[in-house]
């Protein structure tokens, strides 16, 4: 069961105030059934949770129905041609089409629509953070059902590593020998390379940065430039956000155990980093982060 399915299970179990292993596994199994039946990649799983959250809060005793409607709204938000009947045909026939339509109408009044294109990023980051927090429950590699081709699946992961040594690069190589790895020794070089990739249409799936490069005073100007380049999504129109999301890497800061630092770098109050993970646990957490990127 892939990491995002389990992370969604954890998130919903928390909303239900029942974050037990049994509840998490029960919810995650339903999420994964929807993932496989509807060919949901990372963006669709994220959108489903984004819409499901207020519904689960409103109808905790009917969390299953709430999540299914979240899937329905998330799929329609991202994918033209999705029908409510697809829930019945590919996920579960436990509800009639009439029941689903009735609940869908109610969901429209509960859902929060303002700023939805920016909340999309927040939920992706939150699910990644949950996956890191509950690392012991996460698989190291995603499971893809036979003959199931996910719409946004790709073959080789592209990882950009920004560090002054080669330790993280070597860890990525051990985790996935087929991954394409680019390296930079400074944030300035990384900013230039990311801009080059953007113009070439080259996708970077995971961007890992050694926190030491953020803490040294001589790199302060580079940090500011890099932050502005990564906050592009805040200036996008809603219609452009989905294509940006599809190409935006998961940006992870690798923090050494000795550092007592809270990374608060932000632009207009929004965090630039998607996730901060301790260096001492990178060998355990890197496979989880890579599996989230490659679902």
Image (cartoon, rainbow, N blue to C red):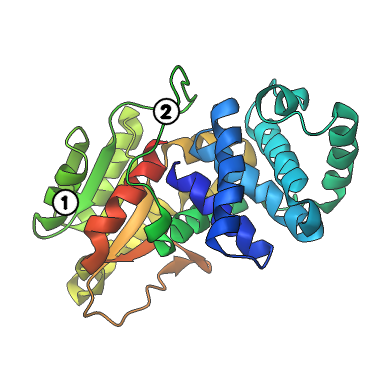
Across and down, in percent, residue 193 comes to: 24, 43
Give the Cα separation between the discs numbered 2 and 1: 23 Å
Q: Residue furthest top?
A: 147
144 versus 250 height, above or below: above
Residue ID at (64%, 43%): 48
Instruction: Quadrant for residue 166, please give it.
Output: bottom left
- Residue 211 visible from this viewpoint: no
Is 24 or 67 nearer to us in this picture? 24
- The residue sitting at 21% across, 76% down in the picture is 217
Q: Dot 2 corresponds to which residue?
A: 153
Q: First in sequence, mark 2 or 1: give its number.
A: 2
Looking at this view, is 71 or 213 the one in front?
Answer: 71
Quarter containing the C terminus: top left
Q: Which residue is mark 1?
A: 171
Across and down, in percent, residue 265 comes to: 40, 70
- Which image quadrant for residue 29? top right
Farthest residue toward the left? 165
Question: 27 or 161: which is nearer to us?
Answer: 27
SS at mark 2 in the image? loop
The quarter of the image holding the N terminus is: top left
- Label 2 CA crowd tier, 10 Å (few <14, some 14–19, many 20+): some
Element assignment for label 1: helix
Across and down, in percent, residue 213 comes to 21, 66
């Amino acid at each position: 069961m892939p990491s995002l399915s389990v992370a969604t299970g954890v998130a919903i179990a928390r909303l239900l105030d029942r974050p037990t292993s049994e509840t998490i596994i029960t919810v995650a199994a339903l999420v994964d059934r929807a993932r496989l039946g509807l060919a949901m990649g990372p963006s669709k799983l994220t959108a489903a949770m984004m819409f499901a959250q207020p519904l689960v809060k409103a109808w905790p005793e009917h969390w299953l129905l709430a999540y299914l409607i979240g899937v329905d709204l998330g799929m329609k938000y991202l994918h033209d041609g999705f029908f409510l009947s697809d829930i019945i045909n590919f996920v579960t026939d436990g509800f009639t089409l009439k029941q689903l339509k009735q609940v869908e109408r109610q969901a429209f009044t509960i859902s929060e629509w303002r700023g939805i294109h920016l909340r999309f990023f927040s939920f992706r980051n939150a699910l990644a953070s949950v996956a890191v927090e509950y690392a012991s429950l996460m698989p190291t590699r995603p499971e893809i059902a036979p003959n199931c081709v996910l719409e946004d699946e790709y073959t080789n992961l592209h990882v950009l590593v920004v560090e002054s040594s080669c330790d993280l690069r070597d860890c990525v190589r051990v985790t996935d020998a087929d991954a394409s790895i680019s390296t930079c020794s400074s944030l300035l070089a990384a900013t230039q390379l990311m801009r080059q990739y953007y113009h070439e249409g080259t996708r970077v799936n995971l961007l890992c940065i050694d926190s030491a490069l953020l803490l040294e005073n001589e790199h302060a100007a580079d940090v500011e430039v890099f932050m502005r380049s990564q906050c592009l999504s805040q200036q996008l129109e809603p219609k452009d956000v989905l294509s940006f999301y599809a190409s935006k890497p998961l940006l992870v800061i690798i923090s050494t155990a000795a550092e007592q630092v809270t990374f608060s770098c932000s632009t207009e109050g929004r965090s630039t980093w998607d996730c901060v993970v301790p260096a001492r646990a990178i060998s355990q957490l890197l496979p989880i982060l890579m599996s989230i990127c490659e679902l």
